[in-house]
Image: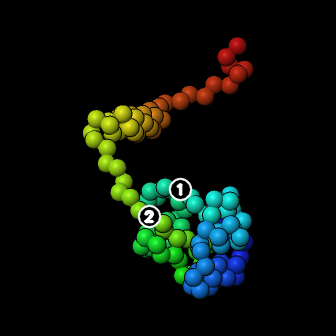
Amino acid sequence: MLKSEDAAKTVIEKLDDGDDFVDLAKEFSKGPSAQGGGDLGWFGPGRMVPQFDNAVRGLSVGSYTHRPVQTQFGWHVIQVQERRPLPVKTLDEARPGLVNNLSAELGQRLMEQLRTDAEIEKTSFKDLK
């Protein structure tokens, strides 16, 4: 994360000149990943804010953004080091999560229906005595 668009443009110029991404991240980044050379670890689609996620999707392995990417956290220059396929769960592995999601959805629908069908009488505290 960089504090300004100008700082991001400077980093991109240095990358264009052949400087190392890791070294530049350590020098210029203001985010928590700076010490690790900007490494954010593995993440899949939809795990980052939309602007960041969209920029990553458009990059091939080894390439970097040639324009600064702005998010609510600041400015970014993003490089994709490697890609790996997302693991696909078997039905047995996915079943607990699916059951949990469906149960939550059905519970929400039931609560909405109960609220819709409820007949509520208001009685003042004085009338309860």
In the image shown, does 27 or 101 lie closer to the viewer?
A: 27
Residue at x 53% of width, y 56% of height: 41
How many numbered marks are there? 2
Point out the residue furthest to the left here. Answer: 91
The amino acid on which the numbered mark 2 sits, given as a three-letter code, is Glu
Under tag 1, what secondary structure? Answer: loop
Distance in Å between CA atoms under marks 1 and 2: 10 Å
Question: Can residue 12 be seen?
Answer: no
Q: Which mark is residue 82?
A: 2
Spot occupied by residue 120 in the image (x, y as percentages of width and height): 53, 30
Residue 25, by quadrant, is: bottom right
Residue at x 54% of width, y 67% of height: 52
In the image shown, does 1 or 46 lie closer to the viewer?
A: 1
Residue at x 36% of width, y 54% of height: 86
The amino acid on which the numbered mark 1 sits, given as a three-letter code, is Gly
Residue neighbourhood size for the residue with mark 2, other residues' Cα within 10 Å, grouped as few (<14), some (14–19), many (≥20): few
Q: How is the image coloured?
A: rainbow
Q: Quadrant of the N terminus?
A: bottom right
Tag 1 residue: 41
**Left of 76 or right of it: where is 46?**
left
Spot occupied by residue 75 in the image (x, y as percentages of width and height): 65, 72
In the rendered image, the vertical position of residue 91 relative to residue 47, given as above or below = above
Q: Quadrant of the C terminus?
A: top right
